[in-house]
Image (spheres, rainbow, N blue to C red):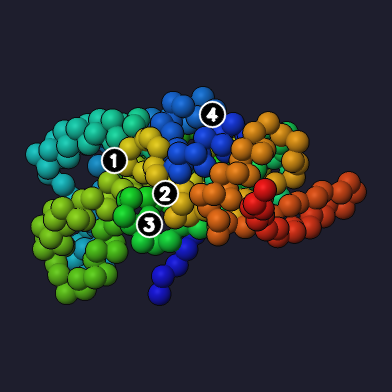
Amino acid sequence: MSTTLTCFKYRSPAAALRCLAEGSLYFAKPSELNDTLEAKYEHATPEDFTRAMMQTYSEIRQQRGGQALAFDQQSMAEMVEAHARECQRLQDFTDQIGIFSAAQRPDHQALWGYYADNASGVCFELEWSQEVMQLHRIRHIDVSYSEQARIHNRAQDWHHVFLEFAREHPNASLDDLRQLSLEEEVRREWGRRTATRAVSIKHTDWSHEKEIRLLAPKSGALPVLGEVLKRVHYLRTDGEHWANTMQLLVTRYPSVELVHWQFSHGELSATPTPMEIRLIPV
């Protein structure tokens, strides 16, 4: 059964017009976003990494009737060397990863103010099908918020990947599992999981945004707007580029619905009103 992910992107008048004209959505580099700590983290020490890896292997071994695992010095040295190499690869990858930040709902008054130029812009309602996300290798994650120092230990992600792999091979020994886990797809899943987590933690100061995050392997404009744009939400019609925005919607996105929101003071209320626009010959 095909599933879809729905999220919302608040856009200023100029940004909305550009997206509609190009038919694209922009996945930004971490350095281009407005959080100075975006995708910033420290790597775990080799000792902490090795300890967590050993705990994972020991857990599997004990589940299968064996004793806790002890690494010899040579194995430890090899793991430390590999850890340093893979940390650098992860850093290089997350520096150029593409991040698309979105919201969970279209009626967030603060987000209308911050990202839609005091509500003079619009909010795109986007529906991402599983097929579109797979085609463009997009991963979805809800951002986590923390005040703690960001110490990233890749072994934590390996724990999840390796335990799932072990469940898929219930009769394999630990040695067999370790050999089988050298397969490229297993290693790729480890890399995807650890990179996704590394770039999806923000300080609690940002927690009011409750961000939905989509990640692409590389930053840049992705020409998918025509495939994912479902509705365009708006509050005001006096914003810059409003007429041009409406013209683009009618001519290039005729099946997209318009939804007008009105906010009242006191108890928050909002009433969406679907609208249709038709071109009238003159």
- Left or right: 245 with respect to 195? right
| Residue 227 higher or lower than 72, as above or below | below
> Which residue position is annotated with label 1?
49
Question: Where's residue 121, x and y in %?
Answer: 66, 38
For label 2, the SS is: loop
Q: Are marks 2 and 4 in contact (CB under 8 Å)?
A: no
Question: Where's residue 263, x and y in %?
Answer: 82, 48
**Amino acid type, residue under disc 3 in the picture:** Val
Q: CA distance from mark 2 to mark 3?
A: 8 Å
Which residue lies at the image location 52% right of the left edge and 35% below the top edge? 18
The residue nearer to you, when weighing 185 against 251, is: 251
- Left or right: 142 with respect to 136? right
**Amino acid type, residue under disc 4 in the picture:** Asp
Q: CA distance from mark 1 to mark 2?
A: 39 Å
> Which residue position is annotated with label 2?
224
> Which residue position is annotated with label 4?
35
Could you tell which of marks 1 and 4 lies nearer the N-terminus?
A: 4
The residue nearer to you, when weighing 55 against 70, is: 55
Which residue lies at the image location 56% right of the left edge and 36% below the top edge? 17
